[in-house]
Image: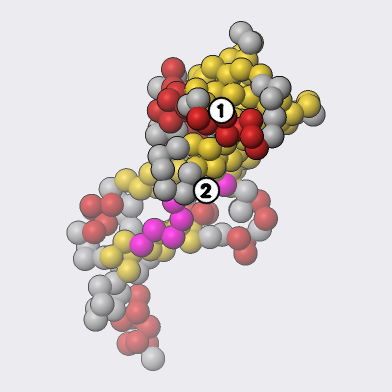
Amino acid sequence: MTDLLTLEAEVRTDLGKGASRRLRHANKVPAILYGEGQEPVSLTLEHKNVFRAQQEEAFYSQVLTLNIAGKPVECLIKDMQRHPYKQVVMHLDFLRIDAAHKVQANAPIHFINEDVAAKTGANISHHVNEIAITCLPKDLPEFIEVDLANLTLGQTLHLSDVTFPAGVTSDELAKGEAHDLAVVTANAPKGKASDEEEEEAAAE
């Protein structure tokens, strides 16, 4: 995993659409590195290495290392353009990071014990598959686990129900209670009301 998160890169001075086209024909990927108040740097990476790395989930949420002219630079992937139908990475945007400065990233969600929740007869609906977070680079989680073992029929888990790793905060929750997004719901099967709905109906 570590090797896949370290990529060799070269500084490129030949810029423009024509130059990028020539790079792609040579199985290379044009990229740009920016952030931390420094000038943007145009880069070139080997497509085979990028393609292998981007197949890993951690590529999108973990700190990456670019070796540029022998000097390691830590960064995050901020954008990636793919060919509309070919298995080709067209362009990459990397954001420089500083170990002392917090970063914003999207952490994928891993739903665990979904089979346990499904045994209640519920239809499990995922409302989001990743969570916008803020933390120091050292605290970036590869993913965030959401345990569905105790999810009951008709229940919805929200961001406020998620256990975040130490040092990690939700960008949405930081905006206030109105942004407490639904994460997952155990829907009652069609034609069957949840216990909560049955109780409400009985009360009426």
Residue most extreme to the bottom: 204
User: In the picture, residue 122 is in which quadrant?
Assistant: bottom left
Residue type at mark 2 is Ile
Quadrant of the rendering where the N terminus is positioned: top left
Q: Is-magenta flag for residue 203?
A: no
| Residue 37 location (% of width, % of height) | 79, 29
Q: Secondary structure at mark 1?
A: helix
Image quadrant where residue 135 sits: top right
Asked whether residue 135 is in view, the answer is no
Q: Height in image: 38 above or below 106?
A: above
Task: Tell me which segment is drawn in magenta.
Answer: 125-132
Q: Report the amino acid beneath label 1.
A: Leu
Q: In the rendering, at what x and y percent does residue 79 appear?
A: 58, 40
Callout 1–callout 2 Cβ contact below 8 Å: no
Classed neighbour count for the residue bearing mark 1: other residues with Cα under 10 Å, few (<14), some (14–19), many (≥20): some
Question: Which residue does the numbered mark 2 point to in the structure image?
Answer: 131
Which label was assigned to residue 23?
A: 1
Residue 140: x percent and y percent? Answer: 54, 32
Helix, strand or loop at mark 2 = strand
Residue at (46% x, 55% y) in the render: 128
Image coords of residue 55 (percent x, y): 40, 34
149 left or right of 37? left
Q: Residue placed at 28% from the left, 52% from the top?
A: 114
Decide whether the magenta segment is chiefly helix, strand or loop: strand
